[in-house]
Image (cartoon, rainbow, N blue to C red):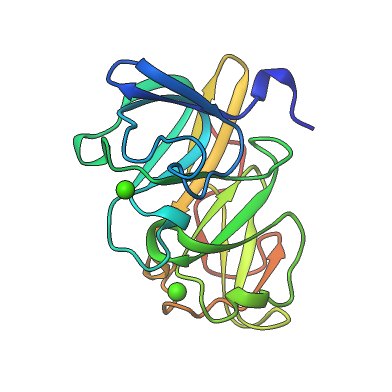
Amino acid sequence: MASEDDFRYLTTYADLSSTGVSNQFTEYAPDLGEVLLLDNTIESVCATGFWTLYDAINYGANDTGDVCHFRAIKTCDDLSSSCRNVISSLRYSGSPYGINNDYYNLYEGINQRGMEFGGETDAPHLGDLDLEVSSLVVSGQSAWTFYTGQGYTGASVCVYTDTHLSSSGIHLDYIQINELTELSLPDNSIRSVKRGCLADRVVGAPPPWP
Ligand SMILES: [Ca+2]
Ligand SMILES: [Ca+2]
């Protein structure tokens, strides 16, 4: 369970340096214009967690506009200049139950775009994302093995996290794979996922981490 200390949030601001109209998000927001009138207004943020912000609504499935990542523990910063006043949707990667729980997120598009298939358990098939996965994020301490066949068959690669943030007793371990070529797999080739490091080919490294 998430404790109060590792509360995941993204606070957005309409001006630089955490000033201007602000809103705090703890859940996905597929259309910032719809309810909040925040479309194309965000310039700076404060956050805990792995957050991705998109130029397009609905996480930019068919869009080539910018994707902006913010991965942090209780940190504030201005968005990079190309990400200011363009953001129209946002969401987090990782477990809904705790920021550093073992979890995987698979995405339809490169750079964490589009439809998603996430989980904390083995998945012998990927539903709508079968033969569609183009990027992913792994969070927490466990490795996950990704297969090019359904039911844990075919070519495989084991993925641990490779980035380890720690602050105020909060930990955030993750790896961000923007394209499957980073795993030496063809685009749209992943068809199943199993917990643990069950492949000869390993990306990232197992704990303990320095
Ligand atoms: Ca936009
Ligand atoms: Ca795809």
Q: At 31% from the left edge and 39% from the top edge, which residue is drawn?
A: 40
Name the quadrant containing residue 2.
Answer: top right
Q: Nearer the viewer, residue 165 or 13?
A: 13
Q: Residue furthest left?
A: 81
Q: At 48% from the left edge and 45% from the top edge, which residue is drawn?
A: 34
Quarter of the image where the N terminus is located: top right
Q: Is residue 141 above or below residue 20?
A: below
Whether residue 109 is visible = yes
Q: Is residue 101 above or below residue 103?
A: above
The image shows residue 48 at horizontal and vertical percentages of: 53, 27
Q: Nearer the viewer, residue 189 or 88?
A: 88
Q: Is residue 20 above or below residue 149?
A: above
The image shows residue 121 at horizontal and vertical percentages of: 77, 59
Name the quadrant containing residue 190.
Answer: bottom right
The image shows residue 206 at horizontal and vertical percentages of: 59, 47
Q: Is residue 174 left or right of residue 7?
A: left
Whether residue 177 is visible = no
Q: At 61% from the left edge and 22% from the top edge, which residue is drawn?
A: 170
Q: Nearer the viewer, residue 178 or 182?
A: 178
The image shows residue 45 at horizontal and vertical percentages of: 40, 25
Q: At 27% from the left edge and 56% from the top edge, which residue is drawn?
A: 65
Q: Tally the marks.
A: 0
Q: Is residue 70 above or below residue 195?
A: above
